[in-house]
Amino acid sequence: MGFSKAKGILGDEFSRDADFLSSVVSKLKLVKNSKVLDVGTGRGHMAIVLALHGYQVITGEPEGANWADWKTPAKKVSVEDMITFTPFNAEKMPFEDASFNAIFLYATFHHIGNKKLALSEFLRVMKPKGTLIIIELTDDGVEVVRKRWRGHPDAVDPRAYTKDLAFEVKVIESKYLNAFIYSKIIDK
Ligand SMILES: C[S@@+](CC[C@H](N)C(=O)[O-])C[C@H]1O[C@@H](n2cnc3c(N)ncnc32)[C@H](O)[C@@H]1O
């Protein structure tokens, strides 16, 4: 299904951030058979965008933390077979070393308790030339979300946690969301 048609079916809640998420996925130019992980399923928006781009996605969040229904929207746009849900905590993930070409977090990083531990897990399960994409709200983005959810936590800049880690980072900025694109620093 085309991206515009999916936005029409899923409505404003999905469409609000979907163009930015989709533009980030396009810029990465991942190969089609990439192993892709989405951390923090929530409403499944990130997983659905990835699936609409043709990627098979593994997505998950801690057992019992499924506060939203990702399957219904995925079915509405016919991508439920592209998405596999498996419960996991980012701080200790049930995946082999060097499993994934790309790991996505959209509006998840600020919810993770031990961010350093999660980052060391991302480094462990990323393939050597893999990419970690942390998409976080900007301060303007938090302000918008707080109109619906007053207690929403502050925005987090992941670079505050990655200074000592073997990562290179580039940032794609927008008014409401920033995407921090990390690659592993590989010894030459
Ligand atoms: C705002 S939602 C993210 C939205 C979602 N990425 C989407 O595309 O709709 C935040 C998510 O982070 C998840 N989360 C919180 N702590 C986590 C952890 N330690 N490991 C994995 N997921 C976590 C929550 O269960 C929740 O689904």
Image: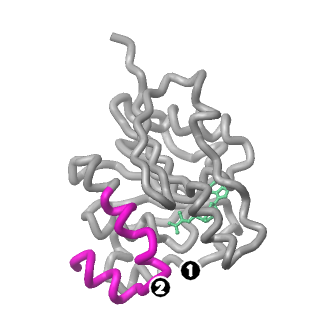
9 in relation to 134, above or below: below
Q: Which residue is mark 1?
A: 69
Which quadrant would residue 143 be assigned to in this image?
bottom right
Q: Is residue 99 in view from this perspective?
A: no
Q: Which quarter holds ligand 1? A: bottom right
* Dominant secondary structure of the residues highlighted in magenta in the image: helix
Instruction: Give the magenta part as a residue range.
Output: 1-23
Task: Please state the horizontal and vertical placement of residue 127, each as a whole percent of the image.
Answer: 38, 34
The quadrant of the rendering that contains the C terminus is: top left
Q: Is residue 59 left or right of residue 153?
A: left
Q: Residue at x 47, y 85 (%)?
A: 72
Q: Residue at x 66, y 44 (%)?
A: 91
Q: Nearer the viewer, residue 26 or 81?
A: 26
Magenta-span inclusion, residue 21: yes
Q: Is residue 87 left or right of residue 152?
A: left
**CA separation, marks 1 and 2?**
6 Å
Q: Which mark is residue 72?
A: 2
| Mark 1 secondary-structure assignment | loop
- Could you tell me if the residues under marks 1 and 2 are in contact, i.e. CB atoms within 8 Å? yes
Task: Please state the horizontal and vertical placement of residue 145, each as a whole percent of the image.
Answer: 63, 70
Which quadrant would residue 93 be assigned to in this image?
top right
